[in-house]
Image: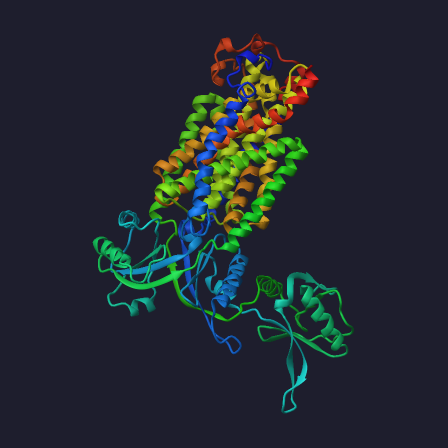
Amino acid sequence: MRNKILMFWAIVAITLVSIGFIVAKPAKLGLDLVGGSRLILEAETTNTIAKITPEVMQRLQFAIENRVNKLGVAETVVQQVGDKRLLIEIPNVTDLKEAKAFIGDTAQLEFKKEGKAPDGTPIWISTGLTGQDLSRSTLTTDQTGQWVVGLEFNAAGAKKFADLTKELTGQQMAIFFDNELQSAPRVNEAIYGGKAQISGGESGFAYDEAERMVNLLNAGALPVPAKVVEENTVGPTLGADSIAKSQFAGMIGLGLVMLFMIAYYRLPGLIACIALIIYSLILFALFKIIPVTLTLAGIAGFILSIGMAVDANILIFERTKEELRAGRNLFTAINSGFDRAFTSIFDSNMTTIITCAILYFLGSSIVKGFALTLALGVLVSMFSAITITKNFMHLIFGTGDLKYPALFGLRKDEIGAGFSATETTRENARFGILD
Amino acid sequence: MANKASKHFIHIVKYRWLWMALSVLLLLPGIVAIIYASAVNPDHIPLKVGIDYTGGTILQYGVTQKVTNEDLAKTRADLQGIGIENPYLQILNVNTSQQDKTKENIQAIISIRTKFIEKESHTPDDIMAVLQKDYEGPELIQVSSVGPTMGKELFKNSLIAITLAFLGIVAYLSFRFKFDYALAAFLGIIHDVLFVIGIFAILGIFFNVQVDGLFMTAILTVIGFSVHDTIVVFDRIRENLRYYSKKMTFGEIVDASVNQTFARSINTSLTVLLTLGALYLFGGVTTKDFVLAMLLGIAIGTYSSIFFCSMLIEFWNDKPATQTAA
């Protein structure tokens, strides 16, 4: 019994901590629900690209989309407006200025070699090996513990790099990022593996600096420079009017679910409702701690996870009732309700989590938001529907002689003689009475 | 408890052909609509797609008053009234450069995103008429075409992710149950998704209902629920097989299992449908179709897990089970 009471206070503590987080931290809501900033970006021509063609715009949009995703904000909108502009909508980010700089950075990576200008002064000249030859970039440390940017070339890039290092053996090779010299190592031998590192020169990279470069390299360079020409704050895409109504409707829906649970399952139903409220509190606290930017897709994931949490309790209670009808005594019935429902709860939740993991790592932004909230919801529901409900059931039905079948929504004649039968010692032990 | 076959409420085995026929009946109209729409629609897509997929036009109007939520709701209804389908309405604040460029001292900007507006069409005039009725001093300050937010690339990536998720589901269920259970659950998903897409194809043909970016999310929800629901029934079959496989045929076990989980199946769906029903009836206009897709999907998901999926594994396992029983 002591364990059960300890568990009860642990649940109370978790609930209070969750409420604390919910009150203390602001919610992050998506563009579709609260709006954010609308930026208009205009592509600019360069010496090499004199005309902004639809093809250039497509590449620009792709690169910008990648970068916006790297900002870590959910469900951004990037779309082409007119011939040479992009409209970007991002939810309220903490530092819009930083976000703008990140989005607009051209991120040109270039490898250069020593050469001479016509007048004889030494300069760096292009080698044709650029960021376009990369397959990906990673953030790592070198032997001395300094942060370095790891580069992995694609097949063509690896060949170019091997040829170049062969040609430059004994000479310096310079790495430029956005026309700024990062480092100029001396090439000792030809490098065939298709891998390279950029160290931050003598002073080395700060972590933030290296991380930003890795993110930019992975997102890809912009084919042409682009600058922000207009900036507005903007209301939610789903319409503020619609959202207010849906909030109200959601409350009605949840209220109905609780009424149904109590009407149908009686006392266990009430316990499930309390567990459900605690579940929502924990989940919302998690959303704020991680933090998760909540969008409508995310809320759909949340609704589905509530459905699954309620389902877990329904499974348990149906099973308990079934066991009661079959003549088991109260303790056995409650325990086998939990035990036997567990495999189906476990298997269905595992399937959901596997699905969510795949969707999260491979899907686009809409799919990601959905997968994240659903996976979190399912994980928390394993705790709430099983641990919390079980604890409450044990505390309430384990203390006294609650022998009214109506509490389970059953009639007296439905229940076999086993209902009032004495419990076996083993059952009592499992129930925590002998503790 | 499991051997009182006569007291069963639902008979999967006995009416196997009926359930098969019912599934066909439920899916057929949708499949016909999908084929018809794919043939007729310009891009050969079974659904009418909204501006999230196709792009459209953004019109920005400055007004000399503050705009409230009620104003937006009214304007949305008025615009639908003059035949502008599913407009995206947003309120923008005014920055100084925009204030300089306009004639009046505008207080807010209303951004209307809708399908492509031809240059010669009178749609801008119609919209202006609506806005003049609803607001003080509306002024058109910008018109531009916009590309899709759910472009082909993004859509393709999502489909690839979903396909891989399917494989993950089949692999896990094959491991925990058996391959034929996994296959039945997979066909159950296809059954449910096909039904929802079919209904929206029909709605597209007859009521010009368009799907937006959220439709993808609704389909994901339907898939999630469909598998979840099916697993609960299968879990019971697995459990009963362990205890009764010597005494009962496979068909009897399926029947018993479906009946034992029936109350739970109905109650679970009911709770989800209660929430979605409230959202559909009282919720915002912009998410109505999204909620409808989920409502339909969860209703059919419940049907398929009870009747379709269990019928399939019973059908496949019919022979070996009778042999062992004999």
Q: Residue at x 32, y 67 (%)?
A: B98
Q: How many marks?
A: 0
Quarter of the picture holding the N terminus of chain B: top right
- Dividing the picture into quadrants, the one containing residue B290 is top left
Q: Is residue A383 above or below residue A233?
A: above
Viewer-side residue, B208 vs A95 = B208
Q: Position of residue A159 (x, y in %)?
A: 71, 68
Viewer-side residue, A223 vs B40 = B40
Question: Is residue B99 left or right of B318 when viewed as pictured?
Answer: left
Asked whether the viewer can see residue B79, the reply is: yes
Q: Position of residue A423 (x, y in %)?
A: 62, 13
Q: Is residue B270 above or below residue B159?
A: above
Asked whether the viewer can see residue A19, the reply is: no
Residue positioned most to the right = A189
Q: Position of residue B295 (x, y in %)?
A: 43, 35
Question: Is residue A393 left or right of B279 when viewed as pictured?
Answer: right
Residue positioned most to the bottom = A119
Q: Is residue A57 above or below residue B134?
A: below
Coloring applied to the structure:
rainbow
Q: Is residue B320 above or below residue A172?
A: above
Q: Position of residue A19 (x, y in %)?
A: 48, 41
Q: Residue at x 39, y 34 (%)?
A: B277
Quarter of the picture holding the C terminus of chain B: top right
Viewer-side residue, A66 vs A277 = A66
